[in-house]
Amino acid sequence: MTQEQLTFKFDQFNHTSEFISYKELASGHINDTYLIITKEEPYYILQRINHTVFKDVPGLISNKVSVSKHLQKKLSHLPEHELKRRVLMFVDTKNGDYYYKDEDGNYWNVMVYINDSVTHDIVTNEEVAYEGGKLSGNFLNLTSDFDASLLTEVIPKFHDMSFRFWQFDEALKTATTERKEQAKTCLEKVSALKEEMHIIQNLKDSGKIKLRVTHNDTKISNALFDKNNKGLCVIDTDTVMPGIAHYDFGDAIRTICNTAAEDETNLDLVNFNLNYYKAYVKGFLEATGSNLTDIELKYLPLGAKSIIFIMALRFLTDFLNGSVYYKIDYPEHNLDRAKNQLKLIESMAAQIDM
Ligand code: GN1
Ligand code: MG
């Protein structure tokens, strides 16, 4: 993408300044994200939504804009400069839509950049773990009065264990012998956990765990902090849709409690940090308050294990499929991610009773 092309996309939106330069932010596995530096602040985030992964981009945009507006209302008691740091603000186009579809069929959206903020790929202190818990708990809390049935299911069955196993089984049917051989230990570990990993799914399907508005991608790099480690807000709300509390609880833990990055290949470095877990849980429970039911609370640890597992399963499936879904840097990248997540589960299970 050239600067000229990006400027053109950016200028479809009602921003308040002039494009000066850009920087690609490469941490996501799905979309293309650019920081747009403008002549005057605020800066902006310009994003191309991957419409192969997200089949209903207008639905996705409508979800995230309406949830943002809801959060803005709920936090309207805050002074304006503070509010702007605590909720994503989407920018509309000259046509009044919140996305622009270009001549190649690509979808773009723009948000106001929250400056003086930091993200963490790996957590290195308890305060960030605690604040991360407050952020994901707060998101559930503040959206608990938003009617989840108004949201589009942007990726149907996103965290559905049976569906992810079905995709995995399909991938096994067509995978090369070489890939299956490379993935042998992972395949064994996955089948050993299969039954346990359906417990939460069954509780959800039987209605025992209720549907809420969930973020569904609460990995810690999707949370903004200020320079003093205080949590500001959750970002990357593309996957906001109906779900269960365990998804958001779990995906944050998957990343906060991993002592290494999700693709670290030296598995000796991959361990589950129990202190960060405790700090995270404290923040999460403080924020959700009395909002969670007994059954939701009871299954939080297993929820975390299940979400770590589902990521392992999805990375493994994509590896078997020849890496057609996640962005990769080398052929075994997804296999390494799967091995990493499975090691994390072992380390977690050794320290926490489910
Ligand atoms: C993907 O693109 P990114 O990094 O926000 C994925 C998540 C995974 C995550 C793993 C739509 O998110 O489900 O947890 O990678 N998003 C989608 O890092 O599949
Ligand atoms: Mg995401």
Image (cartoon, grey):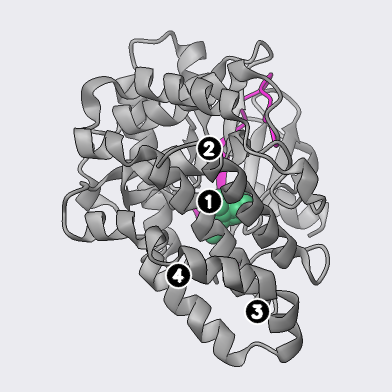
Disc 1 from disc 4: Cα separation: 13 Å
Q: Secondary structure at mark 4?
A: helix
Which amino acid does the dot numbered 2 rest on? Ile
Q: Which residue is mark 1?
A: 308
Which residue is drawn at the image coordinates 36% and 39% (left, top)?
Answer: 300
Q: Secondary structure at mark 3?
A: helix
Disc 2 from disc 1: Cα separation: 8 Å
Q: Position of residue 123 (x, y in %)?
A: 67, 29
Q: What residue range appears in magenta? A: 99-121
Q: Is residue 215 visible from the viewing direction of this image?
A: no
- Asked if labels 4 and 3 touch by Cβ distance under 8 angstroms, the answer is no
Is residue 278 toward the left or the right of residue 261 in the image?
A: left
- Asked if labels 1 and 3 touch by Cβ distance under 8 angstroms, the answer is no
Query: Label 4 CB, ligand 1: below 8 Å?
Result: no
**Image quadrant of residue 335?**
bottom right
Disc 3 from disc 4: Cα separation: 13 Å
Relative to 324, residue 172 above or below = below
Query: Which callout, 2 or 3, points at the residue further toward the start of the chain?
Result: 2
Which amino acid does the dot numbered 1 rest on? Ile
- Asked if labels 3 and 2 touch by Cβ distance under 8 angstroms, the answer is no
Say which of 189 and 334 sits in front: 189
Q: Position of residue 354 (x, y in %)?
A: 40, 42
Which amino acid does the dot numbered 4 rest on? Arg
Q: Which residue is mark 4?
A: 164
Q: Which residue is mark 2?
A: 253
